[in-house]
Image (cartoon, rainbow, N blue to C red):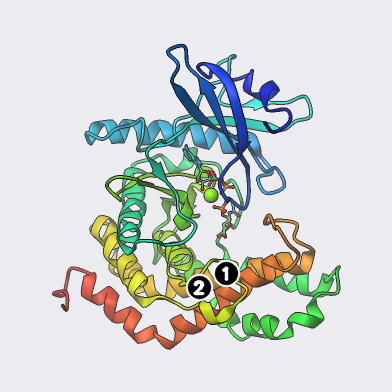
């Protein structure tokens, strides 16, 4: 049992007697634990217990206000659509004082969720069908939140997908270079600089009013969707800390970035890393299946570009964090952020080489053209 968990657990309305508690999952941000309880009838029940990363989320109260509102909205919509609200959205477990979270005397923020059983998240794609289902779930997620009152949402990380601002932060990291790492990554720095012109494209279209702001997830990594063990369908989109106004293109782009990689996000052997066009096709198929009806033509047109831009943005963030000494993303070894950056850049090369095919695939699934067999 990880130290201190029994003390934290005591503040939540969990059922049964605590039997075990261990770190869980592979998220890069929060500290996640699975805690198990023996029930009066002898059965066993698990919950997810999470400490919010306050280095990343500076206003944890805002995070929790969003979480309560968003999950309440999703619950109502899922019920009215005839779904199962216990499995298809995150469900917060209240504290014994009926709060959404518990704050320790040291100001750590803890929250708990019902454990979604009979499903799991995947760090890497094992079955391409899962990807179609995950992409469908991301489209549905946007559709379920399309009637959410946007003004009530806090922007939990300002400018989260503002790529030009990310570039500024990256350039600052290059100049600061506190650990003298820049000298060894000149090629990667140049790779980013050469693509500087692409960076403002989406924020400019948003600012011009050409692309609509929507309530989006903003972190549509493949491991942020739970896949049913039996059916292979996507059960629930999780990790809701970054749900805030954004572009539909961000969710599509980040889904491609994370799933359409033939290897792990931090694979050091780049010969194993490639952009997987067949997986991209699955994402196009799934996302357009559930979001195709509400996306405007300009959003559809920019889907292939968004995949490249979101991959560039993320690679640049990994590189900036490497230069700053790994202060943002969790790392298990000192080169991990650099490995992550390099996989993203290798994928970008694949996307650039396949730019025309990526456009053709969107056109094929857009619904305005028959799908080419
Ligand atoms: P992070 O923000 O650090 O990525 P997540 O909220 O994504 O944290 O949680 C990390 C992992 O924990 C997920 O990838 C998933 O495997 C697991 N997880 C999170 N919430 C649940 C849940 N309600 N039920 C089951 N597993 C969950
Ligand atoms: C982080 O929390 P997690 O692991 O789902 C990050 C994303 C990155 C991703 C890269 C709040 O996602 O933006 O794309 O790592 N989340 C935050 O793997 O910064
Ligand atoms: Mg996550």
Numbered disc 1: secondary structure: helix
| Quadrant of the frame with the N terminus | top right
Residue sticking out furthest to the front: 42
Per the model, the C-alpha gap separating discs 2 and 1 is 6 Å
Please give the name of the residue rendered at 46% of the width and 83% of the height, measured from the top-left corner: 350
Residue at 46% x, 33% y is 115
| Residue placed under numbered mark 2 in the picture | 309
Asked whether mark 2 lies closer than 8 Å to ligand 2, one says no
Image side of residue 328 versus residue 16, left or right: right
Q: Is mark 2 on a helix, strand or loop?
A: helix
Residue under the image location 72 percent in, 47 percent down: 55
**Residues at discs 2 and 1 in contact (Cβ within 8 Å):** yes
Nearest the camera: 41 or 99?
41
The image position of residue 69, as x and y in percent, is 46, 33
- Residue 202 image position (x, y, % from top left): 48, 69
In this view, 258 is above or below 6: below
**Circle 2 residues within 10 Å: few <14, some 14–19, many ≥20:** many
Q: Mark 1 points at which residue?
A: 313
């Amino acid at each position: 049992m990880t130290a201190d968990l029994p003390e934290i657990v005591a503040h939540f309305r969990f059922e049964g007697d605590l039997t075990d508690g261990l770190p869980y999952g592979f998220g890069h941000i929060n500290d996640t634990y699975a805690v198990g309880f023996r029930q009066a009838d002898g059965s066993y029940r698990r919950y997810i217990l999470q400490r919010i990363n306050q280095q990343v989320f500076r206003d944890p109260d805002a995070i929790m206000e969003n979480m309560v509102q968003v999950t309440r909205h999703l619950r109502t919509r899922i019920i009215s659509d005839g779904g199962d609200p216990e499995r298809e959205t995150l469900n917060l477990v209240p504290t014994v004082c009926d709060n959404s979270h518990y704050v320790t005397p040291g100001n750590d923020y803890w929250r708990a969720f019902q454990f979604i059983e009979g499903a799991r998240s995947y760090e890497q794609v094992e079955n391409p069908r899962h990807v179609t289902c995950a992409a469908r779930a991301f489209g549905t997620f946007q559709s379920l939140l399309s009637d959410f009152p946007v003004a009530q949402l806090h922007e939990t990380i300002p400018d989260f997908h503002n790529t030009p601002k990310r570039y500024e932060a990256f350039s600052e990291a290059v100049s600061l270079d506190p650990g003298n790492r820049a000298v060894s990554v000149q090629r990667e720095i140049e790779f980013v600089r050469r693509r500087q012109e692409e960076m403002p494209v989406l924020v400019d279209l948003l600012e011009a009013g050409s692309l609509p702001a929507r309530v989006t997830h903003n972190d549509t990594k493949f491991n942020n969707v739970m896949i049913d063990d039996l059916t292979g369908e996507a059960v629930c989109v999780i990790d809701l800390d970054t749900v805030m106004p954004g572009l539909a293109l961000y969710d599509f782009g980040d889904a491609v970035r994370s799933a359409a990689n033939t290897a792990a996000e931090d694979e050091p052997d780049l010969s194993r890393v490639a952009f997987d066009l067949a997986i991209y096709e699955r994402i196009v198929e799934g996302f357009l299946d559930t979001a195709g009806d509400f996306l405007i033509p300009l959003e559809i047109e920019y889907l292939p570009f968004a995949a490249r831009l979101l991959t560039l943005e993320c690679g640049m963030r990994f590189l900036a964090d490497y230069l700053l000494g790994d202060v943002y993303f969790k790392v298990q070894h000192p080169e991990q952020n650099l490995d992550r950056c390099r996989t993203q850049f290798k994928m970008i090369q694949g996307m650039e080489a396949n730019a025309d095919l990526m456009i053709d695939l969107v056109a094929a699934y857009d619904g305005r053209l028959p799908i080419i067999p």
